[in-house]
Image: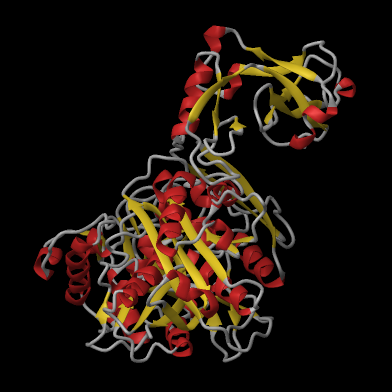
Amino acid sequence: MRVDFDYTRSLGPVLSQFMTGLRDRRILGGVLSDGQVAVPPPEYDGSTHQPVTELVPVGDEGVVQTWAWVSEPVDDQPLSVPFAFALILLDGADVPLLHAVAVDSPAAMETGLRVKVQWAAETRGAITDIACFVPVGASEVVSTSSSTEGSSITEGAVTTLITPVNLAYDYAASPEESKFFRGLAEGKILGQRCPKCEKVYVPPRGACPVDGVPTTDEIELPDKGTLTTFCIVNVPFLGQKIVPPYVSAYVLLDGADIGFLHLILGVDAAEVRMGMRVKAVWKPRDEWGTTIENISHFEPTGEPDADYDTYKQHL
Amino acid sequence: MRDVAVVGFAQRQMKEFEGSPTCVELLVPIFAELFEQTGWTKDDIGFWCSGSSDYLAGRSFSFVTAVDAIGALPPVMESHVEMDAAWALYEAWIKIQTGEVDTALVYGFGKASAGVLRRTLALQLDPYTMTPLWPDTVSIAGMQARLGIEHGRWDARAMAAVVAHSRTSSLDNEYAVLKGAMSVDDVLAEELYADPLRRSDCAPVNDGAAAIVLAASERAGEASTRPAWITGIEHRVDPLHLGARDLTRSPSAAAAGKAAGSAGVDLAELHAPFSHQELILREELGLSENTRINPSGGALGANPMFSAGLIRIGEAAKRIWAGESDKALGHATSGPALQQNLVCVMEGR
């Protein structure tokens, strides 16, 4: 499973100047209360807690203060082949900057090594505008990727920063979830009953939220139930699969004690109401997998609405 | 100040947990074990507080799902921190100090094996100038270790001694995932992984959960014959930027230790995910040669995210219950390169 999200952040006065500088291929440091110059510039002084207001240009060459070899780079690091992360004291600065140094092997790295900036092919107002550092005198490396961070502001001050984040997970289903998904592959909706309070949960959970004990008794539920509550989705959003307006609803399957979130289609959104009786519409069998998407949506059965008392505990 | 003690501790740790990232299935038996230890039921618990992270679970509000393990009906008083559960314990301790409750159950859980932990943790850095470079935890620790080596504060041999001690101590810890008698030379014979670090200088990435029960003096005697009384608990933080501080030191650990009264402890459980960090902590906390360090094996034996710090407090408390220690400290860290530190000092009476 992959989770992707672009974080869009506004920049305050200090970082705005710093990022604008990077876009224009200049590195700025912040002057601290004791006169020291820090790169990147902090927004506030660490000892006096006063805002940092004065920024000064520093060199694009510097000296490695310490480093560690990255023998197995992870996604989105400045280089995809082994490299060194280092703290680099730029000429004119007193506080070192964290960045990558492109060298072939740890034997080529040492504290005290003089390195220079290699700018990205395209600069956008982000720390990744510095593609990496290379030893002074060494030839530039071909950047493996262009910066995806930053903004598209090419003139004037850079005031926002977009940072894409994507994370990959090996998502394991719990034993209860596993049974549930395997059941779906056979067209069954499986819930579990709490041995203590006898409530039936679907999808089954790791523990009964009332009693805090594992729910062990398996129970097959019908694919028919009562709509308890719903919302009409009118707002488009990233990754939306259905054209709005559409209805997202909790369906209390007959015999279950907890609502089941799904889509309601096959009926005008304005007609959808609490207490409406609905049934699952399954996709063609050859499209089934171990997924809740085997059920395309729920639609009205045409039965009379359920009595409010039958579902009032589930709102 | 109210006297508050640690009266219950349970944990589960493994290389890889096969269940859901919310770890509900792990928490249920842990809570059951705590009720057995204390003789209490969930109705005796006044406050519940957890530490975990959605970034590890890969889903939003994952801690809410974990509340299922409590059985929160009727509703319970509950809170959460996006930090190691040692900080949840701090919140619970404050809650008891307010007089609103007399008891609390604190828990932490995390399934680090679901993602690439050293990459995910880049999200705890400065989002403007650090995270976009995805500096991984191991590289940051490597830069810290080299600074210490090159400035003569420690050497590879001292780091290897920490590893060897951890692996040997971990033999007695059923939950340690890395264990086995090892000599300093065995460690030094290993090849470098993230120069200057060897793989064994780094804590393993593993899964787990743990929980602690706290009780004020009015109730502690019901649950334990020799409670571990908290005589000081403090946490401090250093600047986030790696260049903004001397990485070979941990002023926040020293400040937290001093404020919590760490002087004179006979046992310390230190949360040092990298070998050299134990060397920093020993010095900053002023631990003498006579202090017994990490009898559990420490974080190099097992380091489940969001509970490893809480486990240090639990392991230290266990030694007090057993009469092996009269004054012990549990330490927890968070953030890059020992940026944030919490010290909990406990005494047996």
Left or right, residue B79 beside residue A72: right
* Vertical comparison of A46 with B65: above or below: below
Residue B77 drawn at (x, y percent): 65, 61
Q: Residue furthest right?
A: A270
Q: Quadrant of residue B336?
A: bottom left
Give the colouring mode of the picture. secondary structure
* Vertical comparison of A161 with B19: above or below: below
The residue located at (59%, 54%) in the rendering is A123
Residue B313 vs residue B201, the one in the foreground: B313
Residue B124 vs residue B317, the one in the foreground: B317
Residue A153 drawn at (x, y percent): 71, 53
Q: Which quarter of the rendered picture does the C terminus of chain A lie within?
A: top right
Residue B263 drawn at (x, y percent): 37, 91
Residue A210 drawn at (x, y percent): 60, 45
The residue located at (32%, 79%) in the rendering is B268
Q: Quadrant of residue A197?
A: top right
User: Would residue A78 be visible to someone looking at this image?
Assistant: no
* Vertical comparison of B111 with B191: above or below: above
